[in-house]
């Protein structure tokens, strides 16, 4: 299988001396194209730091991160910003939609920020694919939490990114809506060929995952096959 994201001996330490926090410790991981990987572990295990380093939001103290064979851990902030806009999608627990923009405008925002042509018809098709046909003109305040997360998924996929990172995407949703959102992320893999990485506490994610990485104290302790639906 093709490794789309590679972390080699990645460590991230915050602070110095006796009070230093070792968030990641010599972590090795391979994330494969066209798959859904769940990254799990207790609070303080390093999940969030894993996401930040893997997505180019933070730099490792040591080690390397490669996206589609390109070293990103040594890039400058301007390069990383361009890379994130063009090649990485994000889905957050708090949705991170702009309240003054419609659903369609929120979906098109990554293309606008990257200076690319915006295609409203394409955005509406993407919204229809995530179950929001006819809601393109709605503002986030007019949508339920589950609907807002659907907009966020459509926004993450609009640039056809190499990897979509979902950070606790079901954390603020009820059980039924969370299951629908996880099914959509699975569909992103099956229908779009996306590579999805879900960082979560939610054990229900395992049912949709191809692989499950479990972290503890900044180390990768297990790497197991999941049970995709």
Image: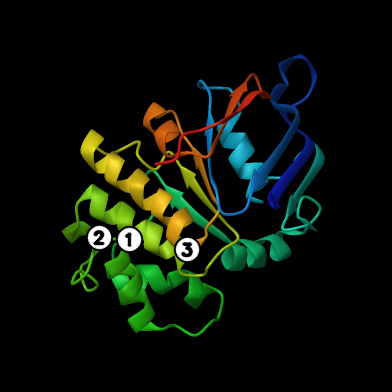
Q: Position of residue 199 (x, y in %)?
A: 50, 37
Which residue is painted at 74% across and 41% down in the image?
A: 7
Would you name the residue on which mark 2 appears? 140
Q: Position of residue 43 (x, y in %)?
A: 51, 22
Quick check: can you spot residue 101?
no
Q: In this view, does 133 lie to the left or right of 183?
A: left
Please give the label number shown on residue 30: none
Mark 2: which secondary structure?
helix
Of badges 1 and 3, nearer the viewer stands 3
Q: Do the residues labelled 1 and 2 touch (CB within 8 Å)?
A: yes
Which residue is painted at 61% across and 43% down in the image?
A: 52
**Which numbered disc flags the more N-terminal residue, 1 or 2?**
2
Quick check: can you spot residue 173?
yes
Q: Residue furthest top?
A: 18
What separation in Å lies between label 3 and label 2 (alpha carbons)? 25 Å
Would you name the residue on which mark 1 appears? 151
């Amino acid at each position: 299988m093709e490794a789309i994201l590679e972390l080699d001996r990645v460590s991230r330490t915050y602070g110095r001396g006796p009070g230093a926090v070792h968030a990641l410790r010599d972590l090795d991981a391979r994330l494969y194209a066209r798959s859904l990987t769940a990254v799990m572990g207790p609070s303080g295990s390093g999940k969030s730091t894993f996401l930040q380093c893997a997505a180019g939001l933070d730099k490792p103290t040591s080690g390397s991160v490669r996206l589609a064979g390109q070293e990103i851990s040594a890039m400058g902030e301007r390069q990383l910003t361009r890379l994130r806009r063009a090649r990485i999608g994000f889905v957050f627990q708090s949705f991170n939609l702009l309240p003054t923009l419609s659903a369609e405008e929120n979906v098109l925002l990554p293309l606008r920020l990257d200076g690319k042509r915006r295609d409203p018809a394409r955005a509406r098709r993407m919204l229809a694919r995530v179950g929001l046909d006819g809601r393109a003109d709605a503002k986030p305040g007019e949508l339920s939490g589950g609907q807002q997360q659907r907009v966020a998924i459509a926004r993450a996929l609009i640039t056809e990114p190499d990897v979509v990172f979902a950070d606790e995407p079901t954390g603020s949703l009820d059980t039924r809506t969370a299951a629908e959102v996880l099914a959509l992320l699975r569909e992103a893999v099956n229908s779009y060929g996306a590579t999805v990485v879900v960082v979560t506490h939610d054990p229900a994610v395992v049912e949709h995952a191809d692989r499950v990485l479990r972290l503890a104290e900044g180390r990768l302790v297990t790497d197991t096959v999941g049970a995709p639906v």
